[in-house]
Amino acid sequence: MADSALTIRTIDDDDLPEFRRVFAWSFLDEPVDEHRWLKVLELDRAHAVFDGDEMVGTGGILTRELTVPGGVQARVGAVTVVGVKPGHRRRGMASLLMETQLHSIRDAGESIAILWASEGGIYRRFGYGEHASSLSMMTMPTRMPFHPGVPVSTTRIRQVTREEAMPFMREVHDRVRRTRTGWLSRVEQSWEVHLSDAERDRGGLTSYRYCLHPQGYVVFRVKHESDNGGPKHELHVRELVCETEQAYADLYRFLLDVDLAGSISFFTATDDPILHMVGNPRKVRQELTDALWLRVVDLEKALPLRRYQSDVDSVLEVEDPLCPWNAGRWRLTVKGGEAVVTRTDDPADVSLDVAALGSAYLGGARLSVLARAHRVVEHTAGHVDALSFAFLGAHEPHCPEVF
């Protein structure tokens, strides 16, 4: 329950200086004149919470397209810059902000909300499902050979300037992201944010290096390291995007063979095939973390958006106190990959809350695993397994950028 003294409204240009300060302070950061996220902030979708005249909380929504299973482009509300000023927490401010955002997203005709969580214990209670997509932090030594079956072409890979690389990267990314579950559309300003290269963004590393293949590209920084044996620099990959499997093999081979480098680090998909391409996969280190959290805002519209792996006919009983239009029993009928969703009074085959549905929506979490975690309850034998398989995709969902 939100404190009755709190109010919330969208912001305008006059509010931006204070909005910037409150958000920076909420993350124990220093306010600066040009926060990079200001480049993508949509004022008519940004909210501030006030205690009287004092701004004490912030939150924004970005208009994006998310690729969902089946290569379908779903318009989503991407939630960002959520913060509460120190000294004002635990007064229901997040609840007020989240509820306002969910209604705003539905009113905009979007049926899905997504976010990256700075703290893992907050957002499930607002209906967001964790591990809707996951990330693997992968580190490997250079010079590792591929197994003999991996073809590497003689295509030349060119290092170019940022200005030369950008038009090509925009075109390749837009084609590829439409085929990859979990990838997002980018507006012009989001490229600037994603590849921000000011000195304060580098963390002691070099500026970005841009290397182009005719069917792909890779962007990375270098951390200079050496010992008595000579240089052993670290390559920190920001983005590797390929239209073909050949380009993928070529670009990875390029990275593994960079002179003076000793290792490669990359936040990548959990099913990145490089693990199975190298001759000694034990040398590849992986650390798993959550990435996208997904919230089904309008179940009746969201479930038919995506495609499914198999036919299924199940009644779902969904719990959703924040979005009561989602609550109740729904019959999910899938034929030929396409779903029809209708309200029903029939007995439930499966019960779950909306956060569990969000975790499973992109195929990132299996409903069968969530059932073992006591997040999903099966009433009719076999339905959890059938639904688990239907919700899977051909590839693990992956979102390569924080927003």
Image (tube, helix red, strand yellow):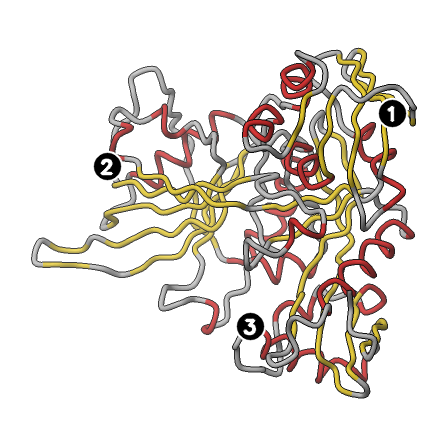
- Residue placed under numbered mark 2 in the picture: 143
Q: Residues within 10 Å of mark 2 (few under 14, many from 20)?
A: some
Q: Amino acid at mark 1?
A: Val
Q: Earlier in the sequence, mark 1 or mark 2?
A: 2
- Residue placed under numbered mark 1 in the picture: 341
Quarter occupied by residue 38: bottom right
Residue 35 lies, with reference to residue 221, above or below; the image says below
* Secondary-structure class at tag 2: loop
- Residue placed under numbered mark 3 in the picture: 27
Q: Residue furthest bottom?
A: 53
Residue 338 lies, with reference to residue 113, above or below; the image says above
Task: For marks 1 and 2, give the CA distance.
Answer: 52 Å
Q: Residues within 10 Å of mark 3 (few under 14, many from 20)?
A: some
Residue at 45% from the left image edge and 58% from the top image edge: 208
Q: Is residue 334 left or right of residue 142?
A: right
Location of residue 283 in the rendering, given as x and y in whole percent from the top left corner: 25, 34
Q: Amino acid at mark 3?
A: Phe
